[in-house]
Each structure stands twice: as C-alpha cells, then as structure tokens.
Amino acid sequence: MAEQESSPAAISKTGFLAMAARNHRNFMPYSIGVDLGGTNLRIAAVDERGTLLEKVTLGTETKRGREFVISEMTTAIRSVIAKYKDKGDLIGIGIGVPGFIDMDTGTVLDSPNLPGWADYPVHQDIEHRLGAKVVLENDANAAAMGEKWLGAGRDVNELVMFTLGTGVGGGIILGGRVWHGMKGMAGELGHSMVVPDGHPCGCGSHGCLEQYASATAIVRMAKEAVAKGMSDPMARASRNDVEFSSKVVYQLAIQGDKAAQEIFATVGRCLGIAVGNFVNALNFPMYVIGGGVVSAWDAFSPAMFAELPIRSFIYRVTMPEAVKPGDKRTIVTRSLLGSDAGLFGAARLPMLAANDKTADVPTGSRS
Ligand SMILES: [Zn+2]
C-alpha cells in the first residue's frame, strides 16, 4: 500500500482530490468588485458562484480628489486580499466608475463626478499598485452586468437596464457581455429624448429622460408644482424638510397627494416612451429598471405600463398579457439586486475577462 501511495499516479490522484476539495469548500476563486459612488466607496469580495464573501463600505467622497480616493481604495482592497489570501485565488478586481471609460486606453474621460481623473492612466496605476488584473467599467454598465449575472436577467443573454438615481444611467448587455460601442460610451440611456424641446439637460440637449425620471428631476418637478400652488402639503414639506427629496414626494404620493401622484405619472410616462423606443430598436427579452428611484415602483410603474403598448407595437404584441403561455415575451421589470447590482457586476467582469482569455473568444468588446 505504501508503495502504491508513493507512485506518481497515486500522488497525482491525491493531488487532484486535494485540489477538488480546495475548489469545493473554502477555495473557490473569487474576485473583488468596487462601486465608486459619489458619497460612498463600496468593496465586495464575491466568489465565482456569486456568493458574497465580504462587503466593506467606506465614506470616501469622490470629490476629495483622485489620489486620495485611489489610495483609500487600494488600501481597503489590499486588506480584503490579505484576508482571503489562504482561502482562494484572486481572479481580478472590477471597478465601477461614474463616468465614461475609454476602453482603448483605460482612462476616465472628463467626468463632473470625478474631478482630476480625466486623462490619467487609472487602469495602469491601480494594476501597478495592487499587482492584480483590473477591469474598469462605467458604473451603470456594471449594474446591468450584476442584474444579468445574479438578478432579474439571470435567464437572458440580452437586456437593457435603466438606473434611476441622481441622474439616469444605463447599460446594454448583448450576448452576455457589456455592449461598449466604439469608444466605451454606449448605453447612455438617460439622454434618450422623451419630450421634444423639454427641460434643458446638462448634456446640451432638451427633454432627456434624465430630466423626468431621476431623483433630481422628481425634486425639480415638485418645486415647480409648489411654485404653481398645486399642493399645500408639498409646499409645507419643501419648507420644513431641509432634505426635501424624491422620497418625501413619494410619501406624499402614496398618501394621496394629487400633485405628487402626477409627478410619478410623468416619471412613468417618460420611462414608457424611452423603454418603448428600445423595445422597438432591439427586440430584447428584458428591460430592467433599477437605481434608488425604483423604490417608488408602485407610484410610477402603472403609467409606464400604460404608455408602453401605445409607444411600441413590438411591446404590444409581445407583452406578457398578449402571448400564449410558454411563448417568448418582452419583460419590463424592476431590478432584484438594488444598490448591490453594481458591486456584483463589477466583481463579475474580471471573471468574464479571464474566461474570454482562456477560450480566446473574440467578443468584439473588452470587458
Ligand atoms: Zn441629456
């Protein structure tokens, strides 16, 4: 027996079993996802099965500048890596960034959310500091990937996601990968035009979705309603509450305030127009609505679902109510992962990059 155990075959079998055990229990390969938000920097370690191993939230404000943010971020990532050093292999680090990423150079294009980051080789710098594979991605694209991997879009390979937050972001998943377009700028769904000659937008256009379906837009529309004397409760709330927010407007809407309800009907109608346009253009099976504003789903979704079949004949003939059981259908739904979508999606990106490299599959886009 002793002889047999020391034979090369037995050793290799033992080695294989040890490896299998290692991969099965505590040694699942993992990656780190980072969500670089405006007010928080969040970091998560996630294994290949999508199990969250650890989540860290730092109160790092991006306005404190590039060097400060990168230094805080890399320090925190290093401590997570040190903790899991003996528990699994690090595949890489995915970072969701609130701005455009030039996918050719790994630089962040000028972003008001990230002062001082433009034209700096962020990707190389962070890879150099951490000695690990780093994937940079726009934060809304990362959120779309999160929903595709573990959320509402688990069973589809194509989806469009709208993230309704301070602004409106978007991400397009095609063939299970983020669709980047020519320069990494695809998926700017917040600047889809929904009201010709509507409210001016920071992008230079007018009537963009972002001006009607973001938290910022909800507060603006509430203040407009107050100025027109349309709601006394809303006027009182805006006077008394220093943090008069879209949440307050939502509370008023569910309490029956007509002006607040009309604001969410506008949110829903504008979303219905935007989603309908994408249904017509893409005929994807799924459109996911996420971001903080989605917590007001019951206030805006009836108007959205009323608008969709008017704006899109493709939706009209493929909506769940119109198809036979088992037939393909267009699903418009809310995100399942909430604010964690971007974190999970960011963690997924290095895994996909590693798979693509191994399989040597040309994806037509780098992710
Ligand atoms: Zn715009």
Image (tube, rainbow, N blue to C red):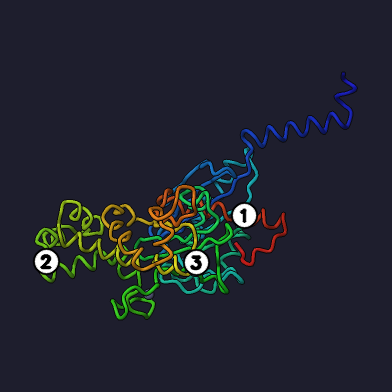
- Labelled disc at residue 282: 3
- Labelled disc at residue 352: 1
Q: Callout 2 environment at 10 Å: few (<14), some (14 to 19), or many (20+)?
A: some
Residue at 57 percent across and 41 percent down: it is: 83
Which quadrant of the view contains residue 181?
A: bottom right
Residue at 20 percent across and 52 percent down: it is: 254
224 sits to left or right of 146: left
Residue behind mark 2 = 230
Residue at 36 percent across and 80 percent down: it is: 205
Look at the numbered disc 2 and give the secondary structure of its residue: loop
Of the two numbered discs 3 and 2 in the rendering, the one whose residue sits closer to the viewer: 3
**Residue 65, horizontal then vertical, whole percent:** 44, 66
**Residue 147, horizontal then vertical, whole percent:** 48, 52
Q: Which amino acid does label 3 sit on?
A: Leu
Q: Distance between the residues labelled 1 and 3?
A: 24 Å
Q: Distance between the residues labelled 3 and 2?
A: 39 Å
Judge by depth and name the residue closer to the eye, 349 or 65.
349
